[in-house]
Amino acid sequence: MTTKLTTNDTLSSFIDKYDNFLFDCDGVLWHGDQAIPGVIEVMNKLRAKNKRICFVTNNSTTSRVNFHKKFDRIGIEANLDEIFSSAVATASYLKHIVKLPADKKVYVIGMNGITEELGKEGIQSFGGEADNGVWPNDPIPNDPSVAAVVVGLDTQVNYRKYAKAFTYLRNNPGCLFIATNGDTTFPIHGSLFPGAGAIQAPLVTALNRQPDAVLGKPAQNMMEAIFAQYDFDKSRTVMVGDRLDTDIDFGLQAGLDTLCVLTGVTSEDQLLSTSNTTNPTYYMDSFADFSKVL
Amino acid sequence: MTTKLTTNDTLSSFIDKYDNFLFDCDGVLWHGDQAIPGVIEVMNKLRAKNKRICFVTNNSTTSRVNFHKKFDRIGIEANLDEIFSSAVATASYLKHIVKLPADKKVYVIGMNGITEELGKEGIQSFGGEADNGVWPNDPIPNDPSVAAVVVGLDTQVNYRKYAKAFTYLRNNPGCLFIATNGDTTFPIHGSLFPGAGAIQAPLVTALNRQPDAVLGKPAQNMMEAIFAQYDFDKSRTVMVGDRLDTDIDFGLQAGLDTLCVLTGVTSEDQLLSTSNTTNPTYYMDSFADFSKVL
C-alpha cells in the first residue's frame, strides 16, 4: 500500500518525519541538464531546515568531481562527499572488496566517470572513451594482465569494445565481469534509451555468463558506504527516486521509507498496477510540490 | 550416438550414401579468407562425382553476389543459386511471409549484406553501415514508417544504432523485431568474437522483449527454401557443419543426416561431452580428410 502526498498536511508531516534525504538525481532533480521546475527552491528550503542530503546515482558516465560541477551549473547545492555514484561504488568495490593486485588492469566499457574513479583508487584501466569510433577490424590480442572488465553506460559503445571485453573475459582465468549498474534503460532527450543493463547484454549472451557483480542501486554497496560515512538514523531517513526497480527497491532493501516521484520513468498507472510488486511508502507528482509547505 | 569417420571404408561409404551435400562455410570450407587446407580439392572431386552442393551460411554481412565472389577468390566452385544466407532468408521472410507494405521501411543493424538483399526484394531500408561511427548524442526522432528492425552481425555496431532501433521498436505499434540469426559467437582472426545473437541482446534487455523471428540456422526457413528450389531426396542429403547449435541442429530438425567437422568452433571434447544433446550422425577432423578416398 502506497500513499500519495497531495494535501498540505501530508506534505508537512512527511518533511517533519525525516532528517535525512537520499536522492536519485535524473528524473527527480533534473532531466538531462535542466532542473525540474521548482526543485531548486525546495532543495534550498530543505537545507535551510538543516535536513541532511545525499545524492545516490547510478550514472557512471561522470566522475564525482564533474557531478559536483553539474550540481553547480544547475544550481542545486551539493558537497563532494554527499555524492555517491555507481562509478565510485565500482572503484571502491574493486579496491576494497576484490583487492585487485596493483599489477593488474581493468578494461572499461564506459565513459570517463569510470576511468577517473578507478584512477582515484589507484587502479590501472584502459579502453573506455579511448576505444570510441570505427574499428578497423584488426586482430585483438589477449592481455593477460586484465583481471576485470567493468561495463557501464557508454553512449559510444561499439563492437571493438565488445570484442576486447569478450577476449579478456574468455581467455583470462578468474577475470571478473563487473557491471556498474543494471538499469535496462535511461532517460535522455525526453525519451528513453538503452541503459547500462542493456549495454552489458552482448557479453552475457556471448559468454553465457552473468556478471560477477552488479553494483549501483538496488545493490546495497552504496547504501553501506552512505551509512559508513554518515551516522543516519534509519527511521528518520527516506530514499527519494523515480524508478521502482532501482531507487525504490534500493531503499526498501535497506529498510528505509521510500518516496517515488512521477517526474521520471515511472507513471502513476505503472506504480498502481497490480503487476507492480515494488511499492514505495509514498509517491507524489513532483518533488517540487513540497514548495506548498516549505 | 555419433560415429567418427576415420577409416577409408567409413569415408567411402559416406560419399556413396549421399547425393546432396549442404555445407556451412566458415569453419568447414574456410577460416576468414583462407581455405582450409585440402578442402578445395575435395570439393572439386565431389563436383566431379556429380554430387549436388548447396552452401547454407548464417553470415549476413555479405550479399549473395559478394559471397559468390568470395567463393571465386578462395577457389571453391559455386553457383549463385546454390548460396543461401541468413540475409537472403531475412529479405525473403519480410517479402513473402510478413508481406511488408511497400510504403514501410526497415531499420537495419547489420552490414551491407542485409541492406543489399532487402533491396533486391524491393524493401526500403536505412541504417546499417550508414550509421557507423561516433554518435554526436543528437536526439533521435521516431520514424513511424519503420515497420521492422532487422539485427544481424555488425562489426561496427554502436550505441546510435541501438538507440535508433530501440526508439522505433518502442514507439511504433506492431514494429517487428527480426534477428537474421542467433549465433552467440562467430569465428574471426583465429579467435571467437560476439555473434549476431549477442549483438541483438541490448534490445532484448532494454525492451524486455524477444525477437519476433530468429531466421538463419537452425530455423527451418532456409531449409524450406532449399527444398523448394531443389528436388532433393532427404534420405540422400547430408548437412555438413562445424557448429552443433546451428548447423547440426538445422539438419536434425529437417530429418537429415548430419556431419560435424572439427575445423571450426566445436572441439571433440565438447561434441562427446555428456552435456551435449545435439548429436550429429557423423563427425570427422576435417572435411579435407575425404581426399583419402576421392
Image: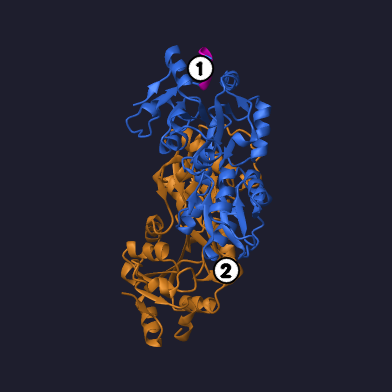
Chain colours: A orange, B blue
Residue A25 picture location, percent across and down:
50, 67
Q: Residues within 10 Å of mark 1 (few under 14, many from 20)?
A: some
Identified at 55% across, 71% down, the residue is A76
The lab-note entry on whether marks 1 and 2 share a chain reads no
Residue A166 picture location, percent across and down:
51, 39
Is residue B226 in view?
Answer: yes
In this view, the residue in front, A11 or B224, is: B224
The chain letter under disc 2 is A
In this view, the residue in front, B157 or B64, is: B64
In this view, the residue in front, B4 or A246, is: B4
Disc number placed over residue B289 in the picture, else none: 1
Determine the secondary structure under disc 1: helix
User: In which image quadrant can residue B56 be found?
Assistant: top right
For the stretch drawn in magenta, the main secondary structure is helix
On the image, numbered disc 2 is attached to which residue?
Answer: A190
Callout 2 amino acid: Gly
Q: Residues within 10 Å of mark 2 (few under 14, many from 20)?
A: few
Q: Vertical placement of A73 versus B33: above or below? A: below
Identified at 37% across, 72% down, the residue is A273
Q: Is B290 colored magenta in this rendering?
A: yes
Q: Which residues are magenta?
A: B287-293
Residue A185 picture location, percent across and down:
50, 60
In this view, the residue in front, A270 or A252, is: A270
Callout 1 amino acid: Asp
User: In which image quadrant can residue A137 be found?
Assistant: top right
Q: Is B155 colored magenta in this rendering?
A: no
Q: CA distance from mark 1 to mark 2?
A: 60 Å
**Horizontal side of residue B178 vs A95, given as left or right:** right
**Horizontal side of residue B29 vs B283, given as left or right:** right
Identified at 64% across, 35% down, the residue is B80
Q: Vertical placement of A276 versus B40: above or below? A: below
Identified at 64% across, 43% down, the residue is B113
